[in-house]
Image (cartoon, helix red, strand yellow):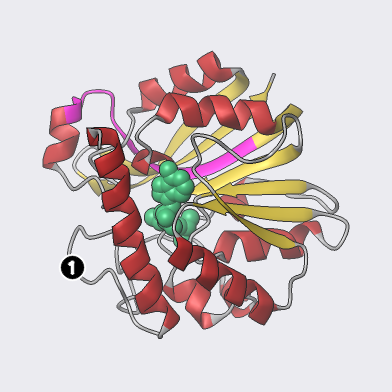
Amino acid sequence: MSSADLLREQVRERYAVAARAASTGGCGCTDSGGCCGNVACDGEDGGFGETLYSVDQLTRVPRTATLASLGCGNPTAVADLNEGEVVLDLGSGGGIDVILSAKRVGSTGTAYGLDMTDEMLELARRNAQEAGVTNAHFLKGVIEEIPLPAASVDVVISNCVINLSVDKAAVLTEMARVLKPGGRVGVSDIVAEDRLTPAERAERGSYVGCIAGALSRGEYLAGLVEAGFDDVSVEFTHEVADGMHGAILKAVRR
Ligand SMILES: C[S@@+](CC[C@H](N)C(=O)[O-])C[C@H]1O[C@@H](n2cnc3c(N)ncnc32)[C@H](O)[C@@H]1O
């Protein structure tokens, strides 16, 4: 196995444990640095904090979806979703953002969740059923090779996942491929200040914990432009470690 494959396997195992725990109402991320932020594990700021779901949003998703919420922001608040649109969530986990998106785009729209971890997919499908949404579909696969046709998606969202990818350039290229021209990106992720080297990022936290693999702001902006996006922006929202931030990324497909 290559080192990239090994790293991806570590990520998969980590989030399988988290999914199994959330399925039974527990928290799979109690060890510090074990995985990305969790809004519900300890009842308050369990991880990267400031996971900005409104009370209204949280009442519209099953408890097991909020327990499995491991994001670092709220991409459904960033991406201005409209009735009838097709939304794709990269690394959909327990399905919270897919369920909220499915409700937002309504019966004429579709929300896809893509994840590589079977346990997360099972949990997400159960959560969507419990939430009563029929326009949410969960696909198994990796975000570096999205199993959807070119120009088939209006909006790509993602919540604390791209930093976990072993090939970020491939993810950005795939996002551009599946988006229709003019399609939008609204992503939450952990992003480093440009002053931090990859080694300094790794000193601040683990890879599976969404710190060591984070891109810098400049790397993200350049990568998005290179992949075919205009109007790119990366806005820091809250610091999670020295020089590392929860951030909102926006871009428009050329
Ligand atoms: C930190 S969790 C975030 C889950 C969800 N977005 C949320 O906000 O709760 C990361 C998720 O991304 C998935 N994942 C990580 N790397 C992936 C990859 N390369 N391809 C597909 N899924 C991936 C994991 O299985 C896990 O469910």
Image quarter of the N terminus: top left
Say which of 213 and 191 sits in front. 213
Residue 134, quarter of picture: bottom right
Is 80 included in the stretch rendered in magenta?
no
Apparent side of residue 126 relative to residue 84 in the rendered image (left or right): left
Q: Residue at the far right: name it.
A: 108
Q: Residue shown at 73%/78% (left/top)? A: 132
Is 196 included in the stretch rendered in magenta?
yes
Q: Residue at the far left: name it.
A: 203
Q: Residue shown at 26%/51% (left/top)? A: 10
Looking at the picture, how far across and down is residue 28, in whole percent? 30, 72
Image quarter of the C terminus: top right
Badge 1 crowding class, 10 Å Cα cut-off, few under 14, some 14 to 19, many 20 or more, is: few
Q: Amino acid at mark 1?
A: Asp
Q: Residue shown at 53%/64% (left/top)? A: 121
Q: Residue at the far top: name it.
A: 226
Looking at the picture, how far across and down is residue 143, in whole percent? 51, 40
Looking at the picture, how far across and down is residue 201, in whole percent? 19, 35
Q: Residue shown at 34%/34% (left/top)? A: 166
Which residue matches tag 1? 31
Residue range (magenta): 185-198
Apparent side of residue 123 relative to residue 178 in the rendered image (left or right): left
Residue 192, quarter of picture: top left
